[in-house]
Image: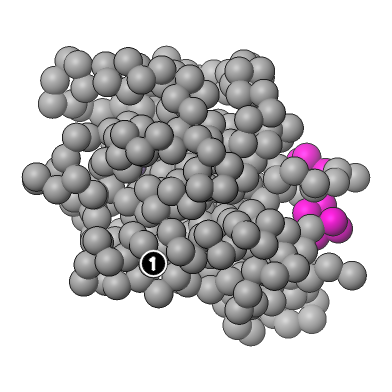
Amino acid sequence: MKNQPLSGNAMPRFGGIASMMRLPVASSAQGLDAAFIGVPLDIGTSHRPGARFGPREIRSESSLIRPYNMATGAAPFDTLQVADLGDVPINTYSIEKSLPIITDFYQTVLREGCKPLTLGGDHTIALPILRAMAARHGPVAMVHVDAHADVNADMFGERIAHGTPFRRAVEENLLDCHKVFQIGLRGSGYARDDFDWPREQGFTLVMAHEVWYQSLAPLMAKIRAQIGTAPCYLSFDIDGIDPAYAGGTGTPEIGGLSVPQALEIIRGCHGLNLVGGDLVEVSPAYDTSGNTALLGANLLYEMLCVLPGVTRR
Ligand code: MN
Ligand code: MN
Protein backbone atom coordinates (compact mmCIF):
# COMPACT_ATOMS: atom_id res chain seq x y z
CA MET A 1 0.00 0.00 0.00
CA LYS A 2 1.49 3.34 -1.10
CA ASN A 3 1.24 6.58 0.87
CA GLN A 4 -2.24 8.05 0.53
CA PRO A 5 -3.46 11.60 1.15
CA LEU A 6 -5.28 11.78 4.46
CA SER A 7 -8.96 11.33 3.60
CA GLY A 8 -11.50 14.05 4.25
CA ASN A 9 -13.55 11.34 5.96
CA ALA A 10 -10.75 10.52 8.42
CA MET A 11 -9.96 14.12 9.40
CA PRO A 12 -11.87 17.24 8.33
CA ARG A 13 -10.08 18.96 5.43
CA PHE A 14 -9.53 22.07 7.55
CA GLY A 15 -7.86 20.00 10.26
CA GLY A 16 -4.58 18.18 10.62
CA ILE A 17 -1.07 19.12 9.50
CA ALA A 18 -1.04 21.09 6.24
CA SER A 19 1.38 18.98 4.22
CA MET A 20 0.94 18.98 0.44
CA MET A 21 -2.30 17.09 -0.27
CA ARG A 22 -2.19 15.90 3.38
CA LEU A 23 0.46 13.37 2.42
CA PRO A 24 2.97 12.00 4.93
CA VAL A 25 5.98 14.25 5.51
CA ALA A 26 9.29 12.50 4.78
CA SER A 27 12.83 13.47 5.75
CA SER A 28 14.50 11.55 2.90
CA ALA A 29 13.65 10.75 -0.72
CA GLN A 30 14.69 7.15 -0.23
CA GLY A 31 11.93 4.87 -1.52
CA LEU A 32 9.96 7.73 -3.05
CA ASP A 33 8.94 7.87 -6.72
CA ALA A 34 7.91 11.53 -6.48
CA ALA A 35 8.00 14.24 -3.85
CA PHE A 36 6.59 17.70 -3.28
CA ILE A 37 9.30 20.14 -2.15
CA GLY A 38 8.93 23.77 -1.11
CA VAL A 39 11.56 26.39 -1.98
CA PRO A 40 10.57 29.54 -0.05
CA LEU A 41 12.93 31.91 -1.85
CA ASP A 42 11.72 35.29 -3.10
CA ILE A 43 14.81 37.48 -2.96
CA GLY A 44 15.04 37.26 -6.76
CA THR A 45 11.77 39.12 -7.35
CA SER A 46 11.81 42.44 -9.21
CA HIS A 47 8.42 43.89 -8.23
CA ARG A 48 5.84 42.67 -5.72
CA PRO A 49 7.50 40.39 -3.13
CA GLY A 50 6.02 37.58 -1.06
CA ALA A 51 6.52 34.31 -2.98
CA ARG A 52 8.50 33.06 0.04
CA PHE A 53 5.08 32.34 1.56
CA GLY A 54 3.95 30.46 -1.57
CA PRO A 55 4.84 26.91 -0.45
CA ARG A 56 2.98 27.30 2.84
CA GLU A 57 -0.15 28.71 1.22
CA ILE A 58 -0.15 26.17 -1.62
CA ARG A 59 0.02 23.40 0.95
CA SER A 60 -2.86 24.96 2.89
CA GLU A 61 -5.08 25.22 -0.21
CA SER A 62 -4.10 21.70 -1.33
CA SER A 63 -6.07 20.22 1.55
CA LEU A 64 -9.19 20.10 -0.64
CA ILE A 65 -7.62 17.96 -3.39
CA ARG A 66 -8.78 14.35 -3.56
CA PRO A 67 -6.61 11.51 -4.87
CA TYR A 68 -8.43 10.50 -8.09
CA ASN A 69 -8.43 12.66 -11.25
CA MET A 70 -12.03 12.65 -12.48
CA ALA A 71 -11.17 14.11 -15.90
CA THR A 72 -8.20 11.96 -16.94
CA GLY A 73 -8.68 8.86 -14.80
CA ALA A 74 -5.20 9.24 -13.35
CA ALA A 75 -4.74 7.52 -10.00
CA PRO A 76 -1.23 8.62 -8.99
CA PHE A 77 -1.29 7.05 -5.52
CA ASP A 78 -2.03 3.56 -6.91
CA THR A 79 1.47 3.11 -8.29
CA LEU A 80 3.70 5.96 -7.08
CA GLN A 81 5.13 6.37 -3.58
CA VAL A 82 4.72 10.09 -2.91
CA ALA A 83 5.47 12.27 0.12
CA ASP A 84 6.05 15.90 1.09
CA LEU A 85 9.77 16.50 1.67
CA GLY A 86 9.22 19.86 3.33
CA ASP A 87 11.16 22.99 2.41
CA VAL A 88 14.71 23.57 1.26
CA PRO A 89 16.49 25.62 3.99
CA ILE A 90 17.57 28.49 1.74
CA ASN A 91 19.56 31.47 3.05
CA THR A 92 17.07 34.31 2.77
CA TYR A 93 19.87 36.93 2.94
CA SER A 94 21.85 35.54 0.00
CA ILE A 95 20.90 34.31 -3.47
CA GLU A 96 24.50 33.27 -4.09
CA LYS A 97 24.51 31.03 -1.01
CA SER A 98 20.98 29.74 -1.62
CA LEU A 99 21.63 28.41 -5.11
CA PRO A 100 24.08 25.63 -4.14
CA ILE A 101 21.87 24.74 -1.15
CA ILE A 102 19.00 24.16 -3.59
CA THR A 103 21.10 22.26 -6.14
CA ASP A 104 22.56 19.99 -3.45
CA PHE A 105 19.10 19.25 -2.07
CA TYR A 106 17.78 18.28 -5.52
CA GLN A 107 20.82 16.18 -6.36
CA THR A 108 20.15 14.13 -3.23
CA VAL A 109 16.52 13.71 -4.28
CA LEU A 110 17.42 12.77 -7.88
CA ARG A 111 20.02 10.23 -6.74
CA GLU A 112 17.15 8.27 -5.16
CA GLY A 113 15.31 8.17 -8.48
CA CYS A 114 12.66 10.49 -7.03
CA LYS A 115 10.91 13.05 -9.25
CA PRO A 116 10.63 16.48 -7.57
CA LEU A 117 7.55 18.68 -7.90
CA THR A 118 8.43 22.09 -6.50
CA LEU A 119 6.29 24.65 -4.71
CA GLY A 120 7.89 28.09 -5.26
CA GLY A 121 9.23 30.54 -4.47
CA ASP A 122 10.12 32.93 -7.28
CA HIS A 123 11.37 31.76 -10.67
CA THR A 124 15.04 32.16 -9.71
CA ILE A 125 14.79 28.66 -8.23
CA ALA A 126 14.44 27.06 -11.67
CA LEU A 127 18.17 27.63 -12.30
CA PRO A 128 19.58 25.65 -9.34
CA ILE A 129 16.97 22.93 -9.94
CA LEU A 130 17.95 22.70 -13.63
CA ARG A 131 21.60 22.44 -12.60
CA ALA A 132 20.71 19.32 -10.62
CA MET A 133 18.52 18.02 -13.47
CA ALA A 134 21.27 18.43 -16.08
CA ALA A 135 23.87 16.85 -13.78
CA ARG A 136 21.74 13.71 -13.73
CA HIS A 137 20.06 13.69 -17.15
CA GLY A 138 22.19 15.96 -19.34
CA PRO A 139 20.56 18.98 -21.01
CA VAL A 140 16.77 18.62 -20.65
CA ALA A 141 13.80 19.54 -22.82
CA MET A 142 11.47 22.04 -21.19
CA VAL A 143 7.85 23.13 -21.30
CA HIS A 144 7.83 26.61 -19.76
CA VAL A 145 4.55 28.42 -19.08
CA ASP A 146 4.97 32.09 -18.23
CA ALA A 147 3.96 35.63 -19.18
CA HIS A 148 7.69 36.33 -19.39
CA ALA A 149 10.57 34.60 -21.17
CA ASP A 150 12.89 35.01 -18.14
CA VAL A 151 15.94 35.28 -20.42
CA ASN A 152 17.24 38.71 -19.39
CA ALA A 153 21.02 39.06 -19.56
CA ASP A 154 20.85 40.69 -16.14
CA MET A 155 18.47 42.67 -13.91
CA PHE A 156 19.72 45.80 -12.18
CA GLY A 157 23.17 44.53 -13.02
CA GLU A 158 22.61 41.17 -11.30
CA ARG A 159 23.04 37.94 -13.24
CA ILE A 160 20.87 35.87 -10.88
CA ALA A 161 17.27 37.02 -10.50
CA HIS A 162 13.78 35.74 -11.32
CA GLY A 163 13.97 37.19 -14.83
CA THR A 164 17.27 35.52 -15.81
CA PRO A 165 17.14 31.76 -15.03
CA PHE A 166 16.76 30.51 -18.60
CA ARG A 167 19.51 32.77 -20.00
CA ARG A 168 21.90 31.27 -17.43
CA ALA A 169 20.52 27.78 -18.13
CA VAL A 170 21.36 28.14 -21.83
CA GLU A 171 24.84 29.52 -21.07
CA GLU A 172 25.47 26.57 -18.74
CA ASN A 173 24.19 24.04 -21.30
CA LEU A 174 21.39 22.82 -19.02
CA LEU A 175 18.72 22.88 -21.76
CA ASP A 176 18.16 20.98 -25.00
CA CYS A 177 17.32 24.30 -26.69
CA HIS A 178 15.51 22.91 -29.74
CA LYS A 179 13.14 21.14 -27.35
CA VAL A 180 12.23 24.19 -25.25
CA PHE A 181 8.70 25.61 -25.53
CA GLN A 182 7.69 28.88 -23.86
CA ILE A 183 3.91 29.33 -23.71
CA GLY A 184 1.83 32.35 -22.64
CA LEU A 185 4.36 35.12 -23.28
CA ARG A 186 2.90 38.61 -23.44
CA GLY A 187 2.90 42.09 -22.00
CA SER A 188 4.91 45.17 -22.74
CA GLY A 189 8.61 44.92 -23.50
CA TYR A 190 11.72 47.06 -23.52
CA ALA A 191 12.31 46.65 -27.25
CA ARG A 192 11.04 44.96 -30.39
CA ASP A 193 13.81 42.35 -30.18
CA ASP A 194 13.15 41.20 -26.58
CA PHE A 195 12.14 37.72 -27.75
CA ASP A 196 14.76 37.34 -30.49
CA TRP A 197 17.43 35.87 -28.23
CA PRO A 198 15.43 32.80 -27.08
CA ARG A 199 14.34 32.16 -30.70
CA GLU A 200 17.98 32.36 -31.79
CA GLN A 201 18.80 29.65 -29.24
CA GLY A 202 16.20 27.38 -30.83
CA PHE A 203 13.35 27.90 -28.37
CA THR A 204 9.77 27.83 -29.69
CA LEU A 205 7.75 30.79 -28.36
CA VAL A 206 3.97 30.72 -28.18
CA MET A 207 2.61 34.18 -27.44
CA ALA A 208 -0.58 34.31 -25.38
CA HIS A 209 -2.47 36.35 -27.99
CA GLU A 210 -1.68 33.74 -30.64
CA VAL A 211 -3.69 31.16 -28.67
CA TRP A 212 -6.50 33.26 -27.22
CA TYR A 213 -9.84 31.40 -27.37
CA GLN A 214 -8.12 28.24 -28.58
CA SER A 215 -7.75 24.73 -27.24
CA LEU A 216 -4.08 24.00 -26.58
CA ALA A 217 -4.50 20.26 -27.10
CA PRO A 218 -3.25 20.44 -30.74
CA LEU A 219 -0.21 22.50 -29.66
CA MET A 220 0.65 19.94 -27.00
CA ALA A 221 0.41 17.12 -29.56
CA LYS A 222 3.04 18.94 -31.67
CA ILE A 223 5.21 19.54 -28.60
CA ARG A 224 5.05 15.86 -27.60
CA ALA A 225 6.09 14.88 -31.10
CA GLN A 226 9.07 17.26 -31.06
CA ILE A 227 10.25 16.36 -27.55
CA GLY A 228 9.81 12.61 -28.03
CA THR A 229 11.43 10.58 -25.27
CA ALA A 230 13.94 13.23 -24.12
CA PRO A 231 14.01 13.96 -20.37
CA CYS A 232 11.68 16.93 -19.97
CA TYR A 233 11.25 19.50 -17.21
CA LEU A 234 7.99 21.43 -16.71
CA SER A 235 8.40 24.94 -15.31
CA PHE A 236 5.11 26.71 -14.62
CA ASP A 237 5.05 30.38 -13.60
CA ILE A 238 1.54 31.06 -12.27
CA ASP A 239 1.62 34.48 -14.02
CA GLY A 240 1.27 32.62 -17.32
CA ILE A 241 -2.39 32.44 -16.35
CA ASP A 242 -4.52 35.57 -16.55
CA PRO A 243 -4.56 37.71 -13.38
CA ALA A 244 -8.35 37.33 -13.35
CA TYR A 245 -7.68 33.77 -12.16
CA ALA A 246 -4.24 34.16 -10.60
CA GLY A 247 -3.73 37.72 -9.47
CA GLY A 248 -1.75 36.73 -6.40
CA THR A 249 1.63 37.00 -8.05
CA GLY A 250 4.54 39.41 -8.34
CA THR A 251 4.47 40.61 -11.96
CA PRO A 252 0.94 40.21 -13.35
CA GLU A 253 0.25 40.73 -17.07
CA ILE A 254 -3.20 41.10 -18.62
CA GLY A 255 -4.57 38.90 -21.40
CA GLY A 256 -3.17 35.61 -20.16
CA LEU A 257 -4.00 31.94 -20.47
CA SER A 258 -7.22 30.56 -19.04
CA VAL A 259 -7.38 27.85 -16.40
CA PRO A 260 -8.70 25.26 -18.90
CA GLN A 261 -5.75 26.09 -21.18
CA ALA A 262 -3.37 25.58 -18.26
CA LEU A 263 -4.96 22.18 -17.64
CA GLU A 264 -4.63 21.31 -21.33
CA ILE A 265 -0.91 22.14 -21.19
CA ILE A 266 -0.20 19.97 -18.15
CA ARG A 267 -2.52 17.13 -19.20
CA GLY A 268 -0.92 17.38 -22.64
CA CYS A 269 2.42 16.46 -21.03
CA HIS A 270 1.07 12.94 -20.48
CA GLY A 271 3.37 10.61 -22.40
CA LEU A 272 6.44 12.83 -22.07
CA ASN A 273 9.43 11.61 -20.08
CA LEU A 274 8.87 14.17 -17.32
CA VAL A 275 11.70 14.29 -14.80
CA GLY A 276 10.26 17.02 -12.57
CA GLY A 277 8.28 20.21 -12.46
CA ASP A 278 7.71 23.41 -10.55
CA LEU A 279 4.91 25.88 -9.86
CA VAL A 280 6.38 29.28 -9.00
CA GLU A 281 5.52 32.91 -8.22
CA VAL A 282 2.44 32.48 -6.00
CA SER A 283 2.51 35.51 -3.68
CA PRO A 284 -0.12 35.03 -0.97
CA ALA A 285 -0.20 38.66 0.23
CA TYR A 286 -1.69 39.62 -3.17
CA ASP A 287 -3.98 36.58 -3.19
CA THR A 288 -6.82 37.85 -1.05
CA SER A 289 -9.26 35.11 -2.13
CA GLY A 290 -6.75 32.28 -1.94
CA ASN A 291 -7.61 31.40 -5.55
CA THR A 292 -4.05 31.73 -6.83
CA ALA A 293 -2.68 29.30 -4.25
CA LEU A 294 -5.65 26.99 -4.81
CA LEU A 295 -4.93 27.00 -8.54
CA GLY A 296 -1.23 26.41 -7.92
CA ALA A 297 -1.98 23.45 -5.67
CA ASN A 298 -4.26 21.90 -8.28
CA LEU A 299 -1.74 22.42 -11.08
CA LEU A 300 0.92 20.64 -9.00
CA TYR A 301 -1.53 17.77 -8.51
CA GLU A 302 -2.10 17.69 -12.28
CA MET A 303 1.69 17.49 -12.77
CA LEU A 304 1.80 14.51 -10.44
CA CYS A 305 -0.97 12.90 -12.52
CA VAL A 306 1.13 13.00 -15.73
CA LEU A 307 4.38 11.64 -14.31
CA PRO A 308 5.60 8.46 -15.99
CA GLY A 309 4.28 5.37 -14.23
CA VAL A 310 0.91 6.82 -13.22
CA THR A 311 -1.94 4.49 -14.14
CA ARG A 312 -5.36 5.56 -15.37
CA ARG A 313 -8.55 3.74 -14.47
MN1 MN B 1 8.88 33.42 -14.62
MN1 MN C 1 6.43 35.50 -15.13
Q: Is residue 85 left or right of residue 100?
A: right
Q: Is residue 281 above or below residue 212?
A: below
Q: Quadrant of the C terminus?
A: top right
Q: Which quadrant of the figure contains the N terminus?
A: bottom right
In the rendered structure, which amino acid carries the disc numbered 1?
A: Ile
Q: Which quadrant of the picture is home to ligand 1?
A: top left
Query: Of residues 47 and 278, which is closer to you in this image?
Result: 278
Q: Secondary structure at mark 1?
A: helix
Q: Quarter-wise, where is residue 264 in the image?
A: top right
From the image, tell me which residue sits under label 1.
Answer: 101
Residue 252 makes an appearance in the image: no
Q: Position of residue 7 (x, y in %)?
A: 77, 73
In the image, residue 102 lies at what x, y percent? 41, 62
Q: Residue at x 9, y 45 (%)?
A: 157
| 268 horizontally vs 235: left or right | right
Mark 1 Cα-neighbour bin, 10 Å: few <14, some 14–19, many ≥20 = some
- Work out whether 27 lies above or below 208: below
**Predominant secondary structure, magenta span:** loop
Q: Quadrant of residue 194?
A: top left
Identify the residue at horizontal 35%, vertical 38% (top origin): 172
**Can residue 71 be found in the magenta stretch?**
yes
- Left or right: 129 with respect to 225? left
- Between residue 90 and residue 210, name the one nearer to us: 90
Residue 112 visible at all = yes
x and y, in percent, of residue 232 in the image: 58, 36
x and y percentages locating residue 257 in the rendered image: 45, 32
Q: Residue at x 66, y 18 (%)?
A: 225
Q: Does the segment drawn in magenta span residue 226? A: no
**Between 139 and 29, which is closer to the camera in this rendering?**
139
Magenta region: 70-79
Quarter where residue 224 is shown: top right
